[in-house]
Image (tube, rainbow, N blue to C red):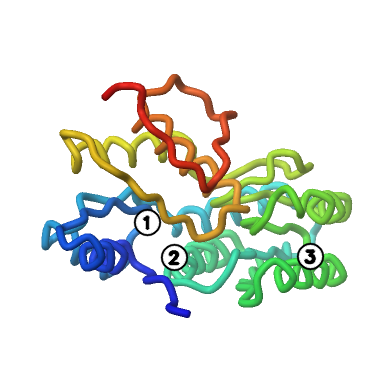
């Protein structure tokens, strides 16, 4: 089994080999390979976030909620291990220094089960606040609600809107999908076939970004609640 290429540049290069013509890519976030693709003209552009501020603002918000005399013990929980999260970690640790709080960085490497175990451990340790990027919001609502009964909980990067988290810190992911689709239309001014690669379809941010891309590319009305089931070939009514 061949492992899928990871970067947008790798994916577009692989597709170009299959279809024997240049396939251009559009990305979310950034890494060195994607930026190289933009320089070379193979990647049209990327929709970038600010993970540093996700880390900083999450800790800042939780710090303001702390009422005790002792230093607040806060946790910043990612959805995995990646350069994106290394940048977010720096933001969270900068908040630790600025705000005189204690911050622990938790990067689960084993998927949703590992993230669940680590959140339960943080609850047991009686931290004063948890900022988490849920891997599968629909399957983690009960877990997040349990945490919210014991401590202050916010989500970042990807939301869990059905949970009792206090707030979500991050971009409007449906809007980000619309922006990404504008780059797709720039890459294909005369139309064409588009394939969307998604890392984890169970994540709230992935669902919304994907839907935003689809809706804008197909010329639909604005509707963040719409959801097209993966696996279907969707066509625009405008030929």
Q: Mark 1: few, some, or many residues within 10 Å (few <14, many ≥20)? A: some
Considering depth in this image, is 11 or 225 the residue closer to the camera?
11
Q: Report the residue at 48% width, 63% height from top.
A: 88
Left or right: where 230 falls relative to 164: left
Percent from the top left, x then y, of residue 122?
A: 79, 69
Q: Report the residue at 16% width, 34% height from top.
A: 190
Q: Report the residue at 35% width, 28% height from top.
A: 236
Residue 197 visible in image: yes
The label nearer to you, 3 versus 2, is 2
Q: Which mark is residue 127?
A: 3
Considering depth in this image, is 229 or 133 the residue closer to the camera?
229
Q: Secondary structure at mark 2?
A: helix
Q: Examine the rendered structure and indicate whether residue 140 appears above or below residue 224.
A: below
Q: Which mark is residue 29?
A: 1
Spatial CA span between label 1 and label 3 = 30 Å
Spatial CA span between label 2 and label 1 = 8 Å
Q: Report the residue at 51% width, 68% height from top.
A: 89
Considering depth in this image, is 217 or 134 the residue closer to the camera?
217
The quarter of the picture where the C terminus appears is: top left
The reply to whether callout 2 and callout 1 are in contact (CB within 8 Å) is yes
Residue 34 visible in image: no
Spatial CA span between label 3 and label 2 = 24 Å
Left or right: where 120 falls relative to 10: right
Q: Mark 3: few, some, or many residues within 10 Å (few <14, many ≥20)? A: some
Percent from the top left, x then y, of residue 111?
A: 65, 70
Q: Quadrant of residue 108?
A: bottom right
Among the two numbered marks 2 and 1 on one chain, the one whose residue lies closer to the N terminus: 1
Q: Which mark is residue 84?
A: 2
Q: Secondary structure at mark 1?
A: loop
Q: Examine the rendered structure and indicate whether residue 146 appears above or below residue 106.
A: above
């Amino acid at each position: 089994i061949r492992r899928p290429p990871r970067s947008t540049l790798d994916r577009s290069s692989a597709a170009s080999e299959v279809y024997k013509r240049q396939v251009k890519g559009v990305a979310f976030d950034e890494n060195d390979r994607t930026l190289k693709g933009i320089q070379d003209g193979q990647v049209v552009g990327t929709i970038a976030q600010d993970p540093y501020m996700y880390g900083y603002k999450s800790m800042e918000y939780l710090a303001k909620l702390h009422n005790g005399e002792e230093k607040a013990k806060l946790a910043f929980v990612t959805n995995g291990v990646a350069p994106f999260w290394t940048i977010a970690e720096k933001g969270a640790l900068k908040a630790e220094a600025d705000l005189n709080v204690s911050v622990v960085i938790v990067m689960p490497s084993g998927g949703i089960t590992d993230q669940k175990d680590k959140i339960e451990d943080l609850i047991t340790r009686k931290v004063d606040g948890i900022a988490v990027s849920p891997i599968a919001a629909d399957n983690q609502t009960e877990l997040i609600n349990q945490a919210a009964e014991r401590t202050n909980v916010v989500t970042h990067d990807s939301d869990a809107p059905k949970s009792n988290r206090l707030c979500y810190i991050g971009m409007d992911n449906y809007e980000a999908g619309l922006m990404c689709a504008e780059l797709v239309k720039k890459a294909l001014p005369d139309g064409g076939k588009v394939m969307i690669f998604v890392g984890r379809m169970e994540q709230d941010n992935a669902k919304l970004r994907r839907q935003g891309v689809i809706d804008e590319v197909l010329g639909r009305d604005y509707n963040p609640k719409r959801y097209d089931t993966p696996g279907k070939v969707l066509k625009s009514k405008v030929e």
